[in-house]
Amino acid sequence: RKPKLASYLGYKKNSSPGITHYLSDQGSHIDDIIIRSPFHENLYYIPCGHIPPNPSELLMGVFIENLIHQLSQDFDYLIMDSPP
């Protein structure tokens, strides 16, 4: 609802697509939404993107399963920051 984590990592709003673009099937590829942190060479993150009117519905779709599957193949650890 009020995403802040990416801004703490130096992300500038609207500089690239975020997870909501991927989950709502707006043509983003997984590689398009992963951003390397300037603080550490092995730290990557995915910004939230635009705030959709239906955030909980996006998490119920097939794209989240594909995203987690692909990320778990490419990375050792996945940390998901989300509201309760």
Image (tube, rainbow, N blue to C red):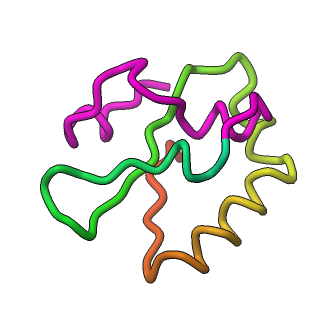
Check residue 7 for magenta coloring: yes
**In the foreground, 19 or 28:** 28
| Residue that extends furthest to the left in the rendered view of this protein | 39
Q: Residue 44 in the image: x percent, y percent?
A: 35, 58
**In the foreground, 30 or 49:** 30
**In the foreground, 27 or 45:** 27
Check residue 21 for magenta coloring: yes
Q: What residue appears at the point 47 percent right and 50 percent down from the top-left corner?
A: 34
Residue 50 falls in image quadrant: top right
Position of 81 relative to 70 (above/below): above
Q: Residue 3 in the image: x percent, y percent?
A: 40, 30
Q: What residue appears at the point 57 percent right and 20 percent down from the top-left corner?
A: 51
Q: Residue 68 in the image: x percent, y percent?
A: 66, 65
Q: What residue appears at the point 29 percent right and 24 percent down from the top-left corner?
A: 12
Q: What residue appears at the point 50 percent right and 42 percent down from the top-left corner?
A: 83
* Left or right for 5, reference 10: right
**What is the span of residues highlighted in magenta in the rendered image?**
1-28
**What is the chief secondary structure element of the magenta stretch?**
loop
Residue 69 falls in image quadrant: bottom right
